[in-house]
Amino acid sequence: MPISSVMADTLKTNARVVILGGGAAGMSMANRLASRLNGASITVVEPREQHNYQPGWTLVASGVWEAPQTLRPNTDFRPAGIKWLTSPATAIDADQRSVSLADGNSLDYDILVVATGLQLNYDMIDGMSPDLIGSNGIGSVYASLDAAARTNESIEQWIAQGGGQGVFTSPQTAIKCAGAPIKMTFTTLSRIKDTANRDNFQLDYFTPSGGMFSQPWVSDFLKQRFDDEGIRRNHHWHLSAIEPGAKQAQFTAQDGGTEVRDYDFIHVVPPMSAPDFVKASDLIAAQGPFQGEWLDTDIHTMQHLRYPEVFGIGDVIGAPINKTAASVKAQAPVVEANIVAFLQDKPLPARHNGYTSCPLITDIGKAMLVEFGYDNDMAFLPSFSFIDPKEESWAAWVLKDYLLQPAYYAMLEGRV
Ligand SMILES: Cc1cc2nc3c(=O)[nH]c(=O)nc-3n(C[C@H](O)[C@H](O)[C@H](O)COP(=O)(O)OP(=O)(O)OC[C@H]3O[C@@H](n4cnc5c(N)ncnc54)[C@H](O)[C@@H]3O)c2cc1C
């Protein structure tokens, strides 16, 4: 155990802290721990130079934002006095408390924060690759900022055709921003309705589940809303193969049966998991619903269930909900408080209540601010008295379009 003592609000410690990933979660933790731990050696491992504001990608893919609006250099947010390494992590030896990097170096740690985000598994869909996004009527908002911009072009081309079949998908795994596949359906419909040709367009939504969303009230609302809008719901199907040349998609049902659909535009959402090098480590869940796919953390304390010096935050953790930047904002103070306590050999004081939020766009210019947590059947946890989580409103759209991005950057800086 590293030597630590409390001084005012900071903890004096010689602990070696390694943070894997410098995205939403890793950057927030770097800033929080840099100001809280006095004397610690903090190393962030993050290969990217630019920070992507991913919640803006749905707006880019919907033709509302320009791509550069979502990019800023990581140097804008990096705290002083930490080490920043750009060679990606390739392996974690949890017993030896050591991380290997692609450049052949390794890092020993007293505290490890796993904040790598998740991996997009496009290769689980036969015939699909992110390179195809933007061609043959294929869109996918998830792959990258460039893919979001190309998705917008594919949608524009489809709408310019004056009609045809649109297919919107959701995969058989947990995903980040579970609302994004639905938002893409609604914003595309909104753009179609702006033309005089609504009746020439057929929209189908495919989901492997019987519901539409993890929050039960929202799930029922969306079913009704899709039906009212004439968007056909196809439950218990997932996209298993695509043939771009023929513009055909194959769906597989729970019983293994398959069905092929023609499309003019398809929005592909890939299966997702923890990155391969995390999956190959002892830190991956060894049993239960997240087995082999997600980091094995206590969903309340964020501490690893078997390696107490390891904490997880963000998309990589196994949890029934979360995987939003809004969750990261709620998790970061919990992880900070619990690491500070752990370094002093004290019981962990903080608990994450599962808070997650989705500014669920239902039309261009309208959204619902859906905030909820683990408890009471995922009951709503509204933050603003003037926004009803059960109402579509322009106020929630304004929040998404203008206000959430500055709040997100304040989170990266560890200020909220
Ligand atoms: C289209 C879309 C729309 C979204 N909309 C919303 C929204 O409206 N509201 C909301 O709250 N959230 C939204 N999100 C989700 C939000 O962006 C994520 O939940 C959030 O970024 C999670 O933070 P993270 O740090 O876990 O992952 P990320 O921010 O993805 O960061 C992970 C970092 O780890 C790094 N990394 C990966 N592998 C390695 C490695 N081997 N070694 C070192 N570093 C590595 C990556 O380079 C990356 O920078 C959206 C996401 C997408 C894609």
Image: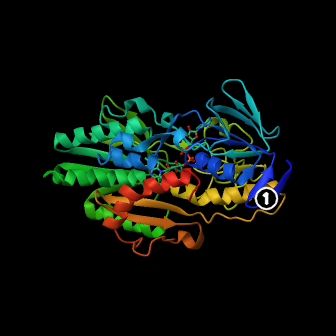
> Residue placed at 68% from the left, 56% from the top?
335
Q: Quick check: 159 above or below 86?
A: below
- Name the spot of residue 139 as percent of width and height, x first: 35, 39
Q: State left or right for residue 368 relative to residue 278.
A: left
* Colouring of the image: rainbow
The residue at 45%/71% (across/down) is: 384
Disc 1 crowd, CA 10 A, few/some/many (<14, 14-19, 20+): few
Asked whether 58 or 128 is in front, the reply is 58
**What is the quadrant of residue 18 in the picture?**
top right
Looking at the rendered image, the quarter that the C terminus falls into is: bottom right
Q: Position of residue 66 (x, y in %)?
A: 32, 42
Picture coordinates of residue 102, whole percent (x, y)? 66, 26
Label 1 near ligand 1 (CB < 8 Å): no
Front one among 83 and 318: 83
**Is residue 235 at all visible to an observer of this figure?**
yes
* Closer to us: 119 or 226: 119
The residue shown at (63%, 52%) is 318
**Does residue 263 appear in the picture of this structure?**
no
Q: Between residues 291 and 341, which one lies in front from this camera angle? A: 341
The single residue placed furthest to the front in the displayed view is 8
**Residue that sits furthest to the left in the current view:** 196
Residue 73 placement (x, y as % from top left): 49, 38
* 332 sits to left or right of 153: right
Where on the picture, by quarter, is residue 364? Answer: bottom left
What's under tag 1, amino acid-wise?
Answer: Met
Image: 302 above or below 316: below
- Helix, strand or loop at mark 1: strand
- On the picture, is 43 further left or further right than 207? right
401 relative to 71, above or below: below
Q: Which residue is mark 1?
A: 7
